Image: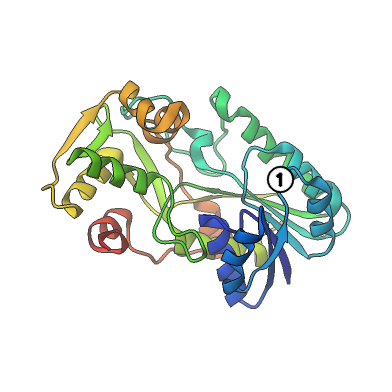
């Protein structure tokens, strides 16, 4: 299958691309410059120069492949609409990447604890309302003669398989711990995020590309941990004896910005990947998050 991927030089996109190439697919991907093209070429990815504002480039790319996987931006409605319009009536496959911050709260490090699976209605906070609407529009496009799917990852950990090696949340917390000499979390650190290893996540993309029915929505998770548990594991890994300290939301905003602090690091985002396991036979195999932090890739 010929597959075009946006975000192909990034952590998720590059990892998906490498996995699909190993599975026998031909993969091209959007990159912003010749320099980024050189970064991805060693992995066997054919570069397409442009950015998300080059809508004609995106339309041409969609017309020349069997499937598009949009990973570069989970909130850009214009980009998704260009792909969906170009693929309408073709029977091709379109996969939109989302993220479980769609179910996040503003807990500030507390744990209210609502858990979502694919059948649970989502009433997002204002910052994520547009993303939920975009997800719904993608799924509805399966009525227009294409196979449209949404994959919604939780906190992702592990080492990327492509040009970009680092995810976001875990490296952020490691760097913050190094800066202060102690693991840090917002408030009590009792807020919980579901999580998934990058190796297991890319296997879900591969399975969805091959077998997902049109209109399918999948959460991606294989366990959950509180941010305090993660901070403790990072502290042990760095030789700080598991010590942690609390910081205010305002301190976190100074480190990570408003969205990063309130929606990403201080919130709860708890999901269960019921449909992927039942429908696609997805069976995650990688080390759990805390084990990976203490004994796996982050030690090096």
- The percent position of residue 136, horizontal first and vertical second, equals 69, 38
- Label 1 crowd bin: few (<14), some (14–19), many (20+), radius 10 Å: some
Q: Position of residue 85 (x, y in %)?
A: 85, 47
Q: Which residue sits at x=29%, y=47%?
A: 174
In the rendered view, tell whether residue 293 sits above or below residue 230: below
* Residue 164 coordinates in the image, percent (x, y): 49, 59
View extreme (left): residue: 241
Locate the N terminus and report the quarter of the image it occupies.
bottom right
The front one of 252 and 49 is: 49
In this picture, residue 53 sits left or right of residue 272: right
User: In the structure shown, which secondary structural element does the residue marked by tag 1 occupy?
Assistant: loop
On the rendered structure, is 229 left or right of 5? left
* Residue 46 shows in the view: yes
Q: Is residue 123 visible?
A: no
- Residue holding disc 1: 52
Near-viewer residue (43 or 38): 38
Find the residue positioned furthest to the front.
35
Residue at point 42%, 40% (across, down):
270
Residue 182 lies in quadrant: top left
Q: Where, quadrant-wise, is the C terminus in this rendering? A: bottom left
Q: Position of residue 28 (x, y in %)?
A: 70, 65
């Amino acid at each position: 299958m010929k597959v075009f991927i946006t975000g192909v030089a990034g952590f998720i996109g590059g990892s998906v691309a490498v996995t699909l190439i190993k599975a026998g697919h031909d993969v091209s991907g959007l990159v912003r410059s010749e320099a980024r093209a050189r970064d991805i070429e060693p992995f066997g990815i054919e570069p397409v120069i442009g950015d998300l504002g080059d809508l004609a480039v995106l339309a041409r790319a969609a017309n020349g492949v069997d499937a598009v996987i949009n990973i570069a931006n989970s909130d850009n409605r214009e980009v998704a609409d260009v792909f969906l319009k170009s693929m309408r009536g073709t029977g091709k496959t379109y996969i939109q990447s989302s993220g479980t911050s769609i179910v996040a709260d503003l807990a500030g490090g507390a744990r209210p604890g609502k858990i979502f699976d694919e059948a649970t209605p989502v009433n997002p906070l204002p910052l994520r309302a547009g993303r939920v609407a975009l997800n719904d529009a993608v799924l509805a496009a399966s009525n227009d003669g294409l196979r449209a799917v949404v994959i919604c990852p939780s906190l992702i950990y592990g080492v990327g398989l492509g040009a970009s090696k680092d995810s976001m949340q875990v490296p952020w917390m490691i760097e913050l711990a190094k800066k202060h000499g102690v693991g840090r979390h917002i408030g009590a650190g009792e807020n919980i995020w579901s999580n998934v290893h990058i190796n297991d996540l890319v296997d879900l993309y591969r399975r969805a590309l091959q077998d997902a029915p049109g209109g399918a929505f999948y959460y991606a998770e294989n366990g959950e941990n509180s941010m305090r548990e993660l901070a403790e594991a990072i502290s042990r890994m760095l030789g700080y004896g598991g010590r942690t300290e609390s910081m205010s939301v305002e301190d976190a905003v100074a480190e990570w910005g408003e969205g990063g602090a309130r929606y990403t690091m201080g919130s709860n985002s708890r999901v269960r990947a019921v449909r992927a396991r039942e429908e696609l036979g997805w069976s995650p195999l990688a080390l759990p998050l805390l084990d990976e932090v203490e004994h796996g890739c982050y030690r090096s």
